[in-house]
Image (cartoon, rainbow, N blue to C red):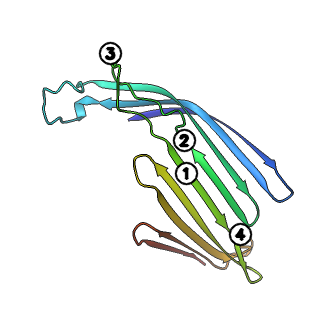
Amino acid sequence: SNFCRYFYGFYHFKITKTVKLSFGLSGGLLQYTVDGSKITLRDKYDAVISNGLQSALIPDFSFGFHLYHEDWFVGASFPQLVQNKLYFFNYQTQTLSKLEDHYYATAGYTFHLGEDFDIQPTALFKYVKPMPAQTQHVSQGGRRNFLINPTFQLSFLAYTLGISVITIGLF
């Protein structure tokens, strides 16, 4: 199990009349807890973990930004910037357990098709070492004034890794 307590700060400002930038920073404490009594070891006499609760309390920081316009946006976030190591025992001087870097980036553009119909393709890129990088593509389309005049909206999600398509229609 784990516990976390974070504090957040963010700021928004105009770069031009139509382009805005938002960014945020968060900091806090993470507590990771392992209940050794719920783990079955291959060798029951292995002293690698005890039968009790073991925990590690570490600081953590994250940063992100979002640059946007009425027709497009781009952003990125970087959680777990510190890459803290997790020490579950007081006597431990070395460990292989640590928080890995995470990288997320997103971008999208709204295409105006006709007077009142839009389609917005969006891409999400994510990378966490040692996994391979992943991308997801999402597109949604519908009437431009959907919230004012709700007649039709269609969204679909397509993954580039594997073939999965999810379609949602709102009438």
Q: Are marks 3 and 4 in contact (CB under 8 Å)?
A: no
Of mark 4 and mark 1, the one earlier in the sequence is 1
Mark linked to residue 147: 4
Cα separation, mark 2 vs mark 4, equals: 33 Å
Question: Relative to 67, is 39 above or below?
Answer: above
Give the amino acid at mark 1.
Tyr
Disc 1 on helix, strand or loop? strand
Give the amino acid at mark 2.
Pro
Q: Quadrant of residue 64?
A: top right
Question: Relative to 168, is 85 above or below?
Answer: above
Question: Viewer-nearest of labels 4 and 1?
Answer: 1
Cα separation, mark 4 vs mark 1, equals: 29 Å
Q: Which residue is mark 3?
A: 91
Q: Are marks 2 and 4 in contact (CB under 8 Å)?
A: no
Q: Quadrant of residue 146?
A: bottom right
Give the amino acid at mark 4.
Leu
Question: Relative to 111, is 124 above or below?
Answer: above
Q: Are marks 3 and 1 in contact (CB under 8 Å)?
A: no
Please give the count of numbered marks on the rendered protein.
4
Of mark 3 and mark 1, the one earlier in the sequence is 3
Give the amino acid at mark 3.
Tyr
Q: Which residue is mark 2?
A: 79
Question: Relative to 1, is 143 above or below?
Answer: below
Name, please, the residue furthest toward the top. 91
Q: Which residue is mark 1?
A: 104
Q: What residue is at 14 percent from the left and 36 percent from the top?
A: 42
Q: Which image quarter is the N terminus in?
A: top left
Question: Viewer-nearest of labels 3 and 4?
Answer: 3
Within 10 angstroms of label 3, few (less than 14), some, or many (20 or more) residues? few
